[in-house]
Image (tube, helix red, strand yellow):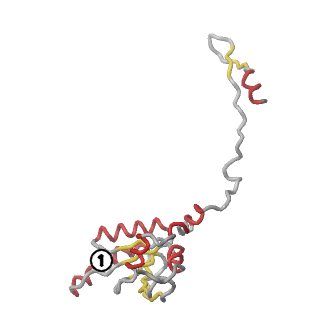
Amino acid sequence: MAASRLLHKACLLWIPSRHSFASLAPKLPRHRSPPGRRKAPKTEGDAADQGQLPEWLFEDRPVWLQALLLFLREPDLIMVRLGGAARRMGRRPATGSLPELKELQLPEGQLRDWALEELREAADAGRKVRAVAVLATEADHAADAVEVLRSMGFKRVANLRTKAFLQQLQTLPGSVE
């Protein structure tokens, strides 16, 4: 009501021109608080920010999930974890629906160097290039790394997104058909 009364009243403003006065409508008050003050309630979007996917994506074992779990069971697969200070090789024990994985931790800047080295070793030994699963601190970094590896000639590459997504995979029941 008060806002409608304000709209009907005109303010007078002195504008130096041929006309002595001009009328302008007043601005309505802003009914929203500044964006930094409010805290939004937790939603599924927050889980996605942490690298997790919504639980409903895993219901009834969709085809993409079955394909990913079968891919992770390949015998010569190596999981490349981006981030960290130095190159380290290790093993991730089998848990839940995941088998034991060979894990290589790399600083993000060394991905291309490692990939070239891996391609050279495969060519010298006369074997196929190993399958690679990529894990990073952020899902975007993992997606970028997958694109880099594919552009360099890796054919079998999977995006494991983040540690949170890997933990979600580990909590799934173990049977894969």
Out of 20 and 168, give the one closest to the viewer: 168
Q: Horizontal and vertical percent for residue 102? A: 41, 86
Check the image and report above or below for 173 versus 63.
Answer: below
Residue 124 falls left or right of residue 23: left
Residue 43 in which image quadrant: bottom right
Q: Can you say which quadrant of the picture contains the N terminus? A: top right
Q: Horizontal and vertical percent for residue 159? A: 42, 71
Check the image and report above or below for 157 versus 49.
Answer: below
Q: Amino acid at mark 1?
A: Leu
Residue drawn where x is 29% and y is 70% of the image = 152
Residue 48 falls left or right of residue 148: right
Residue drawn where x is 41% and y is 70% of the image = 63
Residue 27 in which image quadrant: top right
Q: Horizontal and vertical percent for residue 161? A: 47, 71
- Disc 1 element: helix
Check the image and report above or below for 12 versus 171.
Answer: above
- Tell me the crowding category of disc 1: few under 14, some 14 to 19, or many 20 or more residues within 10 angstroms, Cα based: some
Q: Can you say which quadrant of the picture contains the C terminus? A: bottom left
Residue 126 falls left or right of residue 85: left
Residue 125 in which image quadrant: bottom left
Residue drawn where x is 48% and y is 82% of the image = 97
Check the image and report above or below for 176 versus 46.
Answer: below
Residue 10 falls left or right of residue 125: right
Where is mark 1, residue-wise? 116
Q: Horizontal and vertical percent for residue 39? A: 69, 57
